[in-house]
Image (cartoon, helix red, strand yellow):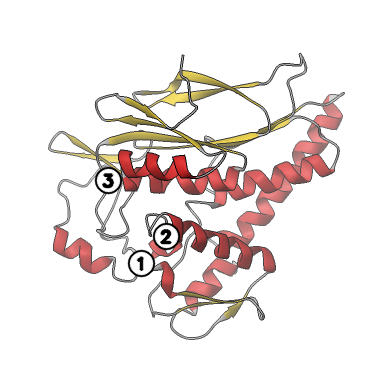
Amino acid sequence: MGNNFTITVVAETNADANQNIDLAVAEIRRIEQLLTTFKSDSQTNAINDNAGIKPVKVDVEVFDLIARSIAISNITQGAFDLSYGSIDKTLWNFDRSMKALPDAETAKKMVHLINYKNILLDKENTTVFLKEKGMRIGFGGIGKGYAAEMAKKVLIKNGVASGIINASGDLSAWGLQPNGMQWTIGIANPDLPQAAFSYLEISNKAVATSGNYEKFIQINGKKYSHTIDPKTGLPITGIKSVTVISENAEFADAMATPIAVMGINAGLFLINQIPDLHCIIIDDENNIYTSKNINLK
């Protein structure tokens, strides 16, 4: 998936632990094969290759994941959009070699294919059709969380009562540590990602962080995040990181990026409307904003 996964399980023996970790890895690889855009035979590429041509029959789980993604697009008013894959790679290049922003007019033209309302689903036949030729979907904003959640389900089904699936900062934790305590999760300091600025004690919760500290460009002394606003085609500024806490890793992963796109006030307003969803935002001046019922120490 282009990310590092760290799998932690509590088990009686090393052999049991390793056997279960192998099961989790196999499940993550299975999901990668379904969702990746880097393998020509994935279902995602089949959908993209037939954009504007014909509907593509997919597995029920892929269909359902797309349906849930569209629901998130609706509640975030398009700040989350699977069809972000339509952005021309010539527009943005985050290998730090960019020296100037594309002009707003060019960016706007390039995002015309990004529109989740043109992802047409046929539930009866489990088909997906991208209405416009050139449209592309990608699961970069939800796939890691989905994989973490599915790997957790496999382990629980196999009798693992406690563990963590960490997909490069999008993680799901369940059960308790061997000492009976909840898991302690560090929230990355965006200025020093190897260190944590705060800690959470959690069990049966998921945490996802979206930040500008891993992938960004700097132009004229200003940092631009790799997170692109699907409406403008331009990168967001002003927010260093968004951490979302939820019951479900897929939902936490999918909500972290759109909150950054929506901005602090609109993002927190939305989070506060959704039960069991919490958020911590750090802006460019290191001010910290939290949703209701978060008490940082």
Image check: 165 left or right of 160?
left
> Residue 200 lies in what quarter of the image?
top right
Tell me the crowding category of disc 2: few under 14, some 14 to 19, or many 20 or more residues within 10 angstroms, Cα based.
many
Total of numbered circles in the picture? Answer: 3
**Residue drawn at x 61%, y 68% as measured from the top left:** 63
Q: How far from the left and from the top, in percent, is residue 27? A: 71, 50
- Work out whether mark 1 precedes mark 2 in sequence or the reverse, and give the earlier one: 2
What residue would you read off at disc 2?
Answer: 81
Q: What label sits on residue 236 in the rendered view?
A: 3
**Secondary structure found at label 2:** loop
Closer to the camera in the image, 259 or 268? 268
> Residue 224 lies in what quarter of the image?
top left
**Secondary structure found at label 3:** loop
**Residue drawn at x 52%, y 34% as measured from the top left:** 169
Q: CA distance from mark 1 to mark 3?
A: 17 Å
Residue 37 can be seen in this image: no
**Secondary structure found at label 1:** loop
Image check: 69 left or right of 107?
right
- Work out whether mark 1 precedes mark 3 in sequence or the reverse, and give the earlier one: 1
Query: Contact (CB < 8 A) between labels 1 and 3?
Result: no
Q: Amino acid at mark 2?
A: Asp
Closer to the camera in the image, 3 or 232? 232
Image check: 257 left or right of 122?
left
Q: What label sits on residue 134 in the rendered view?
A: none
Query: Contact (CB < 8 A) between labels 1 and 2?
Result: yes
Q: What label sits on residue 114 in the rendered view?
A: 1
Q: How far from the left and from the top, in percent, is residue 44? A: 54, 67
Q: Amino acid at mark 1?
A: Ile
**Residue drawn at x 61%, y 50% as measured from the top left:** 146
Q: CA distance from mark 3 to mark 2?
A: 15 Å
Q: How far from the left and from the top, in percent, is residue 191? A: 34, 24
